[in-house]
Amino acid sequence: MSDTKRVFNFNPGPAILPLEVLQQAQAEMLDFKGTGMSVMEISHRSKEFEGVIQTAEADLRELLGIPANYKVMFLQGGAHLQFAMIPMNLRASGSADYIVTGTWSKTAVKEAQKLGATRIAASTESEGFKGFPEKLDLDPKAAYLHFTSNETIHGVEYFSEPTPPAGVPLVCDASSDFISHPIDVSKYALIYGGAQKNAGPSGVTIVIARDDMIARTPANLPVMLDYKIMAESGSLHNTPPCFAIYIVGLVFQWAKKQGGLTAIEKTNRAKADLVYKAIDESGGFYRGHAKPEARSRMNIPFRLPSEELEETFTKEAKKNDLIGLKGHRSVGGMRASLYNAMTVDGAQALVNFMKEFQKKNG
């Protein structure tokens, strides 16, 4: 692969993967561990694939320090399906609380509302989703409190989890900052995330759920929406997304080689600091979206003085092998996604381009 062109990929998801993971997948594509078949061809009931999924789970447990009383599930349907599965499994009766800090937490609320009583404990929408709510209106009897740890579109990230009332389980959509820094899993009742930002390709969703949450699953849910069945089957009730899980497992191994999540967090902070410094020192030519205390290390949305300049920025960045910088269609502007596999060199290349672009157009 030494002659293969690689760009700096700032796409928000599907996103950049570690080069050595891609190289290993390439090397094993035709013959996985002497089977004479690809991982995409072997049976999900085979000992070879059981080794893949069990090793992936063990490595994730090590990376996050997941306690023994939590199940790890590799599911399908993305975070979108979890927006429905969570209230279906955890809110048999009563109401659930949601903190709305951006597009994805707002979407989670809409899905939960279709299925039962849902309260918005706080929302920052009126302020343009630029930070955290100043106070929460929490129900001490809520079935759970749901929040999104990192809003991919608006670039707002929690650096410490909100505190629910005593006895209220905390549920987190961690899709876009999953395995980007250490967390205390024991503070959460359930954590979930689509893999396609930090952990692997699209097609697999990782759910980490405490045993007492899985015990809440009501009878007669459709089988593919039932946490209890999925957990008891080891994510193998039906044919899982085998290749996606295989890649996720390779990413977990790569993360361990980097020194684990403490080392990864340090690198992620360094990359984000480079880009935010360039924005802050631009004299207003570049304008960040999020408030400083809420700035995401994963997704950095910013604006230029005009939409015409933003269009030019995107085109010229692409010519310089800086890909995926156009902001989400709902908010416009630019967005640089700096997931785990993005290198410091990649962040520096973006900063160098930003400074040169400002010199020409400022």
Image (cartoon, rainbow, N blue to C red):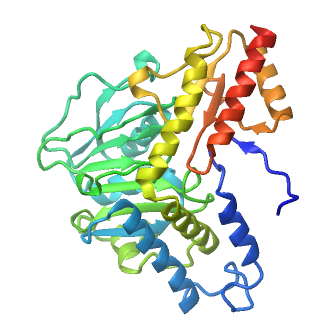
Task: Look at 54% across and 89% down and name the residue there.
Answer: 45
Q: How many marks?
A: 0
Quadrant including the C terminus: top right
Find residue 148 and report its image quarter. Answer: top left
Task: Look at 62% across and 41% down and name the residue there.
Answer: 344
Observer-nearest residue: 272 or 171? 272
Residue 325 visible, this angle: no
Please tell me whether residue 67 is drawn above or below residue 156 in the rendered image: below
Please tell me whether residue 197 is drawn above or below residue 271 in the rendered image: below
Observer-nearest residue: 347 or 44? 347
Quadrant including the N terminus: bottom right
Q: Position of residue 130 (x, y in %)?
A: 44, 22
Q: Position of residue 32 (x, y in %)?
A: 68, 84
55 vs 48, left or right, is left
Residue 21 visible, this angle: yes
Task: Look at 23% across and 64% down and name the residue there.
Answer: 216
361 vs 145, left or right, is right
Find residue 185 and report its image quarter. Answer: bottom left
Q: Where is residue 93 in the image (x, y as percent from the top left)?
A: 21, 52
Q: Where is residue 51 in the image (x, y as percent from the top left)?
A: 51, 84
237 vs 24, left or right, is left
Find residue 234 and report its image quarter. Answer: bottom left
